[in-house]
Image (cartoon, rainbow, N blue to C red):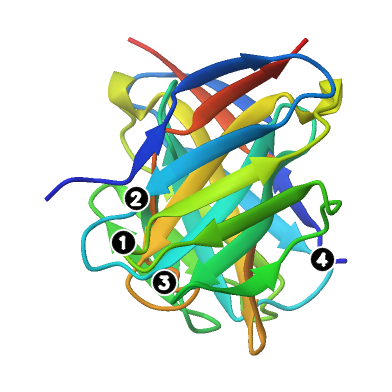
Amino acid sequence: KAGVTQTPRYLIKTRGQQVTLSCSPISGHRSVSWYQQTPGQGLQFLFEYFSETQRNKGNFPGRFSGRQFSNSRSEMNVSTLELGDSALYLCASSKFEMNTEAFFGQGTRLTVV
Amino acid sequence: GQQLNQSPQSMFIQEGEDVSMNCTSSSIFNTWLWYKQDPGEGPVLLIALYKAGELTSNGRLTAQFGITRKDSFLNISASIPSDVGIYFCAGQWGGSNYKLTFGKGTLLTVNP
């Protein structure tokens, strides 16, 4: 079966712009979580969506937001981009809410210049 | 907040050697997980531990959930070149807070 698909794979944006990243979970999976990965901070939890509702949220500013659609696909939006937002953004899907048997996508590499 | 200390940060070993890495936490977790990340890929779940004291194997990998619930270790026996990558531990408290807290990772290099 198809894995978790994240688009785009790479993105370059300018400070102040906004960006939308997309994640298509494995078919049948209803939970989607987003993580930010940087060399300095490692993997940090952004938020989790289950059945179109945000169930958990990490310690990120309000510039980071997300949503989930009825087909379980999820989008993450970052507004007013800062240089420090440059990172690999990973999405993970699982069948159940915050199930530890989560499968990660390849990520979107965002570079802010 | 919860923090995970993962060590060592990096390891350079010869093919065939055994490897051990560990994670310690400032607070209790109810679940410990070990992931491996290859370059350009997302993390892949290797082993999940759900009970204090649990010892679980997955091929040449063995992981244990510490009895204090504040630590876990991962052993890799008879390493091979494809073991190269970054290994992450992650803890989950559970209850109303399901988020995973990750360690900073251990970069493993295997010399053929």
Residue in view at x 39 percent, y 59 percent: A93
Q: In this view, which residue lies farthest toward the left?
A: A1
Q: Are marks 1 and 2 in contact (CB under 8 Å)?
A: yes
Q: Is residue B40 above or below residue A60?
A: above
Q: In this view of the protein, which residue sits in the foreground, B55 or B41?
A: B41
Say which amino acid is labelled 4. Answer: Gln
Q: Which residue is mark 3?
A: B55
For the residues labelled 4 and 1, the Cα–Cα distance comes to 27 Å
- Same chain for the residues at labels 4 and 1, yes or no? yes
Answer with the quarter of the image where residue B112 lies: top left
Q: Give coordinates of residue B65: x percent, y percent.
A: 54, 72
Q: Which residue is mark 1?
A: B57
Give the mark nearest the N terminus, 3 or 2.
Answer: 3
Answer with the quarter of the image where residue A82 lies: top right
Any mark on residue A49, and which?
none
- Check disc 2 and report its element: helix, strand or loop: strand
Q: Are marks 1 and 3 in contact (CB under 8 Å)?
A: yes
Residue in view at x 38 percent, y 78 percent: A96
Q: Is residue A35 at all visible to an observer of this figure?
A: yes
Say which amino acid is labelled 2. Answer: Leu
Q: Which residue is mark 4?
A: B2
For the residues labelled 1 and 3, the Cα–Cα distance comes to 7 Å
